[in-house]
Image (cartoon, helix red, strand yellow):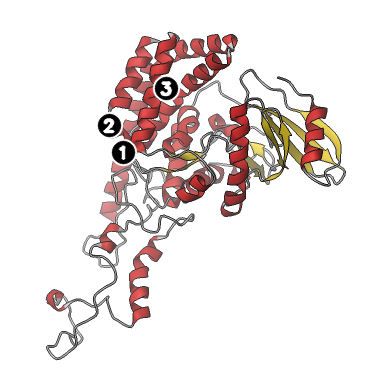
Amino acid sequence: MTRSPLFLAALASSAVPGLDPVTVEGVPGEPGDLFEIAYVQDSQDRRWVVKAPCTAAAGAMLDDISALSGLLGRRLDVAMPMVRGLAQVPEGRAAVYLRVPGRPLDFSGLRPGPLTAEVGRTLAHIHNVEHLLFEEAGRPTYDAEAHRRRQLSELDRAAATGHVPTGLLTRWEHALEDVSLWRFAPCAVHGTFIGQNVLASFDDDGDSSSGHVRGVLAWEASRVGDAADDFAELASLASAETLDAVLEAYAESRIERPDVHLVRRARLAAEMAPLRSLLHALASGQLDVVERTAEELRALDARVEADDRRHAQEDAERSERTRQARERAAVLLDPDDPERPEPEWDATQPHAPFPMLGETQAISMTTLLDEPQEYAAGTGADHSAPSPERVTDDVEEGPTWAHADDPEPEPSPWPEGAEEDSQPVPVMAADADASTFEIDEVEALPEDADGVLDLHEGASDFVAVEHRPEHPA
């Protein structure tokens, strides 16, 4: 199905009162696209995007995203498409929203620096959103086991087509049956966090060090599920140093630290991405897309062993850097110094969840440690004082309050061990060259990847993210 740009402009005019189209520009589509998109500029110089579904399933997605944008748009630090009007079409309803400013990123050309850190913080901010908000908008929800079984089901369906090499089927089946790999806390997930859906603005054109993330597009696959899915393209395209920088900023901003297998699952998600394309193309009868995807899978089967060796070498180098950084920090810090800072947290180790999971902003370590004392001060009881059983010789001066005639202190409103369960956000490593935490595996930068398409919803002109020597990362 192909609608003309003029028809889409007419849909936008009917959906938004006061929208008087002056110019319209259609976005070329590809086989298998779920939506048809056009850019419209009106008489007030406002730039709009009209997005029409190609199937009934795509129409249902747009309806859900309309509800999500109203709930989520004001809670994010970055912009997202805010639906301003809907127009009826045979497949459902077309959505119209103001165009989000910014230029798409190329993850394969991204280098460590301020922009890379903003990408990590943006992902963390999305993943910090309360689950109930996504559920209220009608988005799917998967816990760890449901997510694993869903992928096993997709693998079985793809195996039945005969287009997936046997080596890949065996490899993926073993990974999906390794239950220890799938122990994670579900969170809000964007679903298609790829470079062309992440928009940035630049103070100095072409200089990535001046970039800022402005918006995130394409929320149709959003859900509650595995955070690793949003790292799939970063793990497959970004360099090892870039992925480390993204994960470092991400870990500092998350209310829950990443689990130890996040990068491994992200690589697996990137490998299995063609399966969904294959199943969708078969369902819609697009045989040319089926053949192209089958060729991609055969090429992937031929290179996975080389990728695994490269990942193992990069992970070993990262582990060694982290070990050396910790040794240097141990030498510099006197263990007997009472004012020495707490040791650095390893964000990849199993951990207890942070409290107050409903917050959409990261919780600082200071806030977590101070809250019990503030609560006690509000009740008039000094819960920070030691109990009679805990009075020891460690108290050098000052009278003790544990007397037989004193009234018993009020019981603490905080559960026993609450402070031990609260874990601080990871801090920067003592060595600037060292990673804040240790991740099992990482993908290297493809040598021939140098750009992304700028033909997608809501993006302005494309700018390649390049490393310039005069602007060190």
The reply to whether discs 1 and 3 touch (Cβ–Cβ < 8 Å) is no
Q: Report whether 298 appears left or right of 26.
A: left
2 or 3: tag closer to the N-terminus: 3
Q: 298 or 5, which is in the foreground?
A: 5
Q: Is residue 373 above or below residue 199?
A: below
Name the disc covering residue 154, or none: 3
Report, in whole angstroms, how far the alpha carbon at label 2 lies from the one at label 3.
Answer: 17 Å
Task: Kindly check if marks 2 and 1 are in contact, taking CB atoms under 8 A apart as contact.
Answer: yes
- Looking at this view, is 63 or 337 the one in front? 63
* Of labels 2 and 3, the one closer to you: 3
Any mark on residue 183, and which? 1
Say few, some or many: other residues with alpha carbon within 10 Å of mark 2 (under 14 / 14 to 19 / 20 or more): few
Classify 192 as above or below 138. Answer: above
The one nearer the camera, 226 or 154, is 154
In space, the residues marked 2 and 1 are separated at their CA atoms by 7 Å
Q: Earlier in the sequence, mark 1 or mark 3?
A: 3
| Residue depicted at 80% across the width and 44% down the height | 46
Please name the residue that numbered disc 2 is placed on: 179
Amino acid type, mark 2: Val
Pinpoint residue 93: horizontal percent, then vertical percent: 68, 35
Query: Which residue type carries mark 3?
Result: Glu
